[in-house]
Amino acid sequence: MKKKILIVDDDPRNIFALKLTLKSEGFEVLDASMVDEALSVIKENKDISVVLMDMMMPEKDGYQALKIISETPEISDIPVIAVTAQAMTGDREKCLDAGAKDYITKPINVELLLKAIQNIT
């Protein structure tokens, strides 16, 4: 059975590139460009294996999304990998403290991403 992954990113180029890569690896891929849209997709698709969450987005950011996910019982067990261009000291810890199960920096190293997905699903 294919694992289902949700990509949440406000940049369509990032979604496009990630989608191609993940589909070629045999994953089923959904996407959302805003946090509210992502939350709807998660609630409609209880079989999502992992969410790849861009941490810097307009309106609601990834940190707010992680808080909402963790406080919503029916979706709180879905693992989230933080995907961010922020690679400063402390950013990884900030994402993990917010509830992310792992942290991947942009530009994305596909090998590291696949390993992270494998480790938490």
Image (spheres, rainbow, N blue to C red):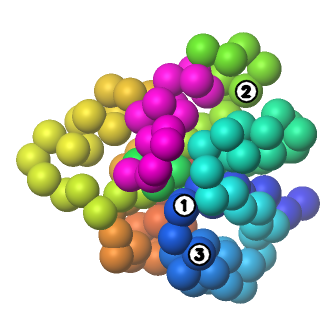
In the rendered image, residue 7, in percent from the top left (x then y), is placed at 63, 60
Give the residue at mark 2: 75
Label 2 neighbour load within 10 Å: few <14, some 14-19, many 20+: some
**Residue at (67, 34) in percent of width and height:** 78
Three-letter residue code for mark 1: Asp
Three-letter residue code for mark 2: Ile
| Looking at the image, residue 56 lies above or below residue 73 | below
The tag on residue 77 is none
Eye-nearest disc, 1 or 2: 1
In this orientation, does residue 18 appear? no
Give the residue at mark 3: 12
Eye-nearest disc, 3 or 2: 3
In this orientation, does residue 8 appear? yes
* Range shown magenta: 56-70
Please tell me which residue lies in front, 96 or 2. Answer: 96
Please tell me which residue lies in front, 94 or 58. Answer: 58
Give the residue at mark 1: 9
Q: Disc 1 vs disc 3: Cβ atoms closer than 8 Å?
A: no
Answer with mark 3 or mark 2, whichever residue precedes in sequence.
3
